Image (cartoon, rainbow, N blue to C red):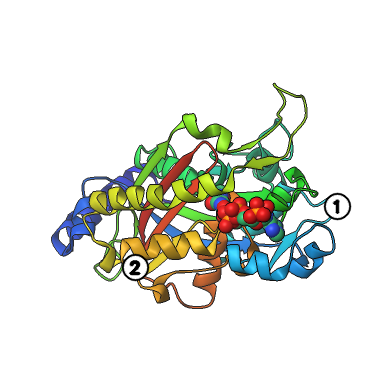
Amino acid sequence: MQTRVDFEQRADQDSRRESESRTDGAQTRRAAREPFTRIAGVGGALPERVVTNQDLAEMVDTSDEWITARTGIKERHIAADGEYTSHLAERAARNALDDAGMSVADIDLIVVATATPDYAFPATAVVVQERLGMTHGAAFDIGAACSGFVFALATADAMIAAGSARRALVIGAETFSRILDWEDRTTCVLFGDGAGAVVLEATMGTDNGASRGIIAHALRSDGSHRDKLYVDGGPSTSKTSGVVRMRGQEVFRFAIQATVDVVEEVLAKAGICAADVDWFVPHQANKRIIDASAKKLGIAPEKVVLTVCEHGNTSAASIPLALATAARDGRIKQGDLVLLEALGGGFTWAAAVVRW
Ligand code: UT7
């Protein structure tokens, strides 16, 4: 078994070798932080039931044409009765562990980003921990609405960099169908259920001479916008869970500029420019927002991973689900530079640069 001393000695050697082999700005920036965090595996999970725009048109006054033209969404997955956020999170976590070739014994931290927890407490992460049969380590939830996955990724990365965790499951999981007003056509057509997960691992080494891992992140929030996208209830206010309320046009306008700002911040931190990015994996809220943001940033459409058409907006799950989709179909490959970005209720917004 590897001891902490072994790890630290190997880490010192690896880190010396790595600093000798670094060539680009991104890798040089990352050199200052040790250990750094690589993504060792990714997995997704979707409920079986698919609800199409046509299905929704039979429930509320809407149409496939309107939803497609305004959002790009064609269908979404909706959880079955008795299928909870923790079930989807557990499935995504198991898929990510398989992809990493690891077992739960290797993990010492679980962070779940969700706005739709199973319960007010315990944290959904703790429920997932129990389902995975894990009684060691720590598990907790993070709430940053649709930006939650990037906030969770940054938190786990910081804990790994600080030496308080070695390998983490970072999960974005949602059952937004449970907090929708199914009579409000302005919101119920937008969202879907699902989960995605990554396995993070502390590493000092290099793979083929190029540092792989989380290079930089940037997190932002501004609570003065909280009445533009929110849930109108909660344990402390209404003693209910409430439903989603949104002033869509205001969110839309804010989202594009905020996205561009936070991406520019993270690119600067990483020491790269937009042209260096191989894959842009944004939060999947609306194809029009994604297209406009990519255009403003100068990222070519063929570098954008789009899943909103099939998944709808799955909030904190959307980025890891998109990562799982693009890794599984072979688009995102080892060594690619991947840019993540999200905006959600609060507002919160965030971005990260990862070398896959
Ligand atoms: O994940 C967190 C971040 N969330 C977002 O980024 C969402 C941001 N906002 C949006 O994506 C868009 O604002 C929406 C997709 C929500 C709405 O698109 P829009 O182009 O901003 O439409 P709108 O709100 O200006 O509504 C235009 C019209 C209105 O009718 P009138 O007043 O022009 O007669 C709405 O009542 O479309 C009507 N409308 C609908 N019609 C058919 C609103 N929802 C629907 C619907 N079906 N589902």
Query: Which of 34/68 is in front?
Result: 68
Q: Find residue 73 and report its image quarter.
A: bottom right
- Above or below, 231 against 85 in this view is above
Q: Secondary structure at mark 2?
A: loop
Few, some or many residues within 10 Å of mark 1 (<14, 14–19, 20+): few
The number of numbered discs placed on residues in the rendered structure image is 2
Disc 2 from disc 1: Cα separation: 41 Å
Residue 300 in the image, given as x and y percentages of width and height:
36, 73
**Left or right position of 39 against 65:** left
At x 72%, y 62%, the residue is 77
Query: Which of 221/185 is in front?
Result: 185
Q: Secondary structure at mark 1?
A: loop
**Left or right position of 162 against 20:** right
Q: Is residue 196 visible?
A: no
Q: Find residue 90 and name its label.
A: none
Q: Nearer the viewer, mark 2 or mark 1?
A: 2
Residue 246 in the image, given as x and y percentages of width and height:
62, 43
**Left or right position of 24 against 289:** left
The image quadrant where one finds ligand 1 is bottom right
**Left or right position of 261 against 155:** left
Q: Which residue is mark 2?
A: 299
At x 57%, y 61%, the residue is 321
Residue 90 in the image, given as x and y percentages of width and height:
68, 53
The type of residue carrying mark 1 is: Asp
Query: Which of 13/91 is in front?
Result: 91
- Above or below, 329 against 191 in this view is below
Residue 147 in the image, given as x and y percentages of width and height:
50, 46
Q: Which residue is mark 1?
A: 81
At x 26%, y 67%, the residue is 276
Few, some or many residues within 10 Å of mark 2 (<14, 14–19, 20+): some
The type of residue carrying mark 2 is: Ile
